[in-house]
Image: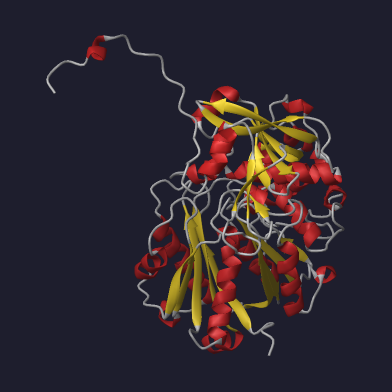
Amino acid sequence: MSLRGRYVIAGVGHTAFGKLPGSDTVSLNVEACRGALADARVDKSVVDAVFVKVPTSAHQFMFGQKVAEALGIAPRMGGAWDQGGAANVTLISFAIMAIEAGQCEVALICYADNPRSGSRAVYGRPRGDDAAYGWLSTAAGYAMIHRRHVIEHGTRPEHFGAVALACRRHGAGNPNAQLRSPLTMDAYLSSPWVVDPLRRDDCALVSDGAAALVVMSAKRARELGVPQPVPVLGFGHGQTSFELPQRPTLTSTEAARAARTAFEMAGVGPKDVDVAQLYDCFTITVLMTLEDYGFCAKGQSGPFVADGAIEFGGALPVNTSGGLLSETGMPGLQLIIEGVRQMRGTARLQVPGAGVCLVSNQGGTMHTHGTLILGN
Amino acid sequence: MTSPDPKSTAAPAPKPVPAFPKPEITELNRPYWDALEQGHLVVQHCAAGHAWLPARRHCPTCLADAAGWRRASGRGRLVSWVVYHTAYHEAFAARLPYNVALVELEEGPRLITNIVDANDALRGDAPVVLCVEREEGQALARFRLGAATSR
């Protein structure tokens, strides 16, 4: 039997975003989980699985067990998963499959990190022996992909800028957003290079914070009286090489494979999607995800976004709470939470009548991809 | 030791340029770096003829044991490049803005490198030719814009 709609996100929670001096990743996780349990109106005693995404900036031994201990939960299943930003969708998928297999009933999924007040060294890391050539940082990998997209498709700076403008516009009114200043195209084009062709405003924020959600079956949610469960319609995954030179192409992402699985499970296609939360660690990621999901032809994402299609009020509003470029640089769980708000009808920039929300999460340098489709 | 350090009374030396991050040379990858010392580029291969970089014990295509190294033509094409305006390591601060490029060799493998030409001369898919340079005694496989490849 298809899993479509039989599992729900029962509750969501998050901490403040931005700079949180003195924070630690275990207690940030606890704060977000407390919020998610309260939102679901369930007690922690029903939770029997705790799936944690490792903190990007500070991996720790047995981190999932530390978080469960701090939550005062002795779960049947749990641990920490290292897969970059796509881990959020993976952990939701694992939770659903584990519940379906009778291994647990109610799962907490959470993530916390504090690179802004702690160490952001991971983002400038040497990339193996290639550091001898000056090949360091996460941003440079995306810059390499960005340039190739320009070479192959003639994508213009204004196209990348349109993504940044949309996210910044959407985040500007979000009281919880870290960067609430809207961006003009002139300001985008004159923002300084980080690693050319990446400008500062192409790049995700560096943020402290945490987010969490509760996953259970739709049946269990009814039994527990969960007030606003949001059904999961589909999910899918795809992964490619760790190092950029090891993949055959730079201009296709694993979004295509992930979405094929997710769309098939959900029984919907791109035309059915009312609102999307697309992982925007860098503007190029949004453009290539739009192409690989089939919202436009390969290479046509620039013209697609140039006319405001991804802004609130456009054909496909994207990142309605600001995304990684405006709300928080947290790798992806905030996008799922905004998807939940859109499906509940409680988003600040609520897309009227939205019934299908697509969420993309991806990790590393487009190494990993997860697609999640939510309904209502 | 009780004898005074003769350097201790000298004027402080100017701040040294930090050492660049040298490759970690192992038994596995030594043939690659030794070949560069001799001025040429090699790729690793298996008995079935699959070629790859960087060094591995097993062919990532057929999982056979690595059979050896063979000399590459040194010709390739420029797939993409970036220009750093931020130094993520102090050793590169004085070089800003510097490029890092992704080159595809005629033989198939791709690698990370630098193009020694001016940043604004770089073009997508431009042919490039090996140009071994030394950095603190370490031979590196850099490339220059060059003649068309043979295929």
| Viewer-closest of B93 and A373 | B93
Residue A191 at x, y = what percent? 69, 33
Is residue A173 visible to us here? no
Residue A292 at x, y = what percent? 78, 60
Side (left or right) of A271 relative to A67? right
Q: Determine the residue positioned at 82% across, 31% down.
A: B147
| Viewer-closest of A40 and A357 | A357
Q: Picture quarter containing residue B120?
A: top right
Side (left or right) of A153 relative to B45? right
| Viewer-closest of B15 and A344 | B15
Side (left or right) of A181 relative to A315? left
In the depicted structure, whether residue A227 falls above or below residue A182: below
Q: Picture quarter containing residue A198?
A: top right
In the depicted structure, whether residue A90 falls above or below residue B75: below
**Quadrant occupied by the C terminus of chain B:** top right
Numbered circles on residues, count: 0
**Quadrant occupied by the N terminus of chain B:** top left
Q: Determine the residue positioned at 73% across, 47% down.
A: B107
In the depicted structure, whether residue A114 falls above or below residue A317: above
Residue A373 at x, y = what percent? 70, 71
How was the colour assigned to the protein in this rendering? Answer: secondary structure
| Viewer-closest of A28 and A2 | A2
In the depicted structure, whether residue B63 falls above or below residue B25: below
Residue A30 at x, y = what percent? 42, 64
Is residue A325 visible to us here? yes
